[in-house]
Amino acid sequence: MRKTRLILFVNLFILIFFGLVMIYSSSCIYAQNVYNDGMYFLKRHIIFICLGILLMFLAMSFDYRHLQGKTKLIVLFAIFLLVLVFFVGKEAGGARRWFRIGYFNFQPSEFAHLALILYVADFISQKKMLIKESFLKGILPVLLVLGAISGLILLQPDLGTAVAMGIIVLLMLFVAAAPMRYLLFIFLVSLISFYILIFSSPYRKARILAFLNPWQDPRKSGFQIIQSQVALGSGGVFGRGLGHSRQKLFYLPASHTDFIFSIIGEELGLVGTLSVVFLFLNLIIQGFKIGRYAQDTFGIFLSLGIVLLIGLKAGINMGVSIGVLPTKGLPLPFISYGGSSFIFDMIGMGLLFNVSRFSEEI
């Protein structure tokens, strides 16, 4: 596993370094205009990188199997934080999702991602036979925990994160050989619930309609999607050149966070975007290798959950940028600016490396 771990480690730090360059390129003019410091976001992200690397190595430093039996407490703590954010959290844009800690924001839903993956991996490792045989004892407990966490996230409100969590849990149950009749039933119920949640909320409905036809309202709901596609389209094969994006000049909102992939496409062209896609595909492949050779069921499903989480976040971010998915505020892992998202992704990678340390030598 040393070779796999080395490839994954190099791949991860290429993504981080590339993200550092692109965050500065996409944010320097905005930062200079708003904060009178063109390196404002760059300097803060360097702090996030240092903290993330430290926490990644801490997550590697113990035997991950010691987490088994403690995952219920971790999930309960995650639920506590999701409740607490409604009382002492910071509100922005009509959503209350963040704790303000000094100069930084902490989003408890990012911690909830990892907590849920740990819980489901632990549950599957202990109840694998029940998952195949009993809905009440083998699947319902997982759905109740997922429902509690997703429900609290929906109240923030944040439908996209709740949906992403549901997809990860269903895929983990699928790999655990849960009966297809149960999974199809859960999927259909989720689909109906998703439809109701979208069309019962004016702003969610507007997002879907903007996704289907952004030119129907090009100055409001469709503005971000249109500007993102303009950025990607104007980059061509080789791009305008690093630092030469025009869309970052106050045309494309969130150019250094949710839509950094569009700026990559504009400045580095198709070559740059395909390079990012390749790096994430390689990360996913190496992560699956670690899960495949893990020595225990908990390690297998912990690796699976972490790889699915990072891969899904990357896929959704890119899908939104190119216009094949509705707008959803998910950063591009390891590349976008975003403190708590980056830090918990690094902790997840630390746990993945941890699993590989206890796998057989290959």
Image (cartoon, helix red, strand yellow):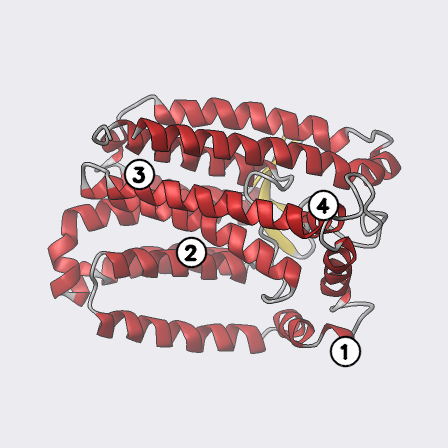
How far apart are the two marked residues, 3 and 2, measured between alpha carbons? 22 Å
Which residue is tagged 4?
Answer: 268
How far apart are the two marked residues, 4 and 1, measured between alpha carbons? 30 Å
Which residue is tagged 3?
Answer: 290
The correct choice, above or below, for 94 with respect to 359 in the image is below
Residue at 84% over, 38% down: 29
Q: Amino acid at mark 1?
A: Gln
Q: Amino acid at mark 4?
A: Leu
For disc 3, the neighbor class at 10 Å (few under 14, some 14 to 19, many from 20) is many
Quarter holding residue 95 = bottom right
- Give the SS element for disc 4: helix
- What is the quadrant of the C terminus in the image? top left
Which residue is tagged 1?
Answer: 216
- Taking the view exactly as shown, the residue that stands out farthest to the front is 237
Q: Amino acid at mark 2?
A: Met
How far apart are the two marked residues, 3 and 1, measured between alpha carbons? 46 Å
For disc 4, the neighbor class at 10 Å (few under 14, some 14 to 19, many from 20) is many
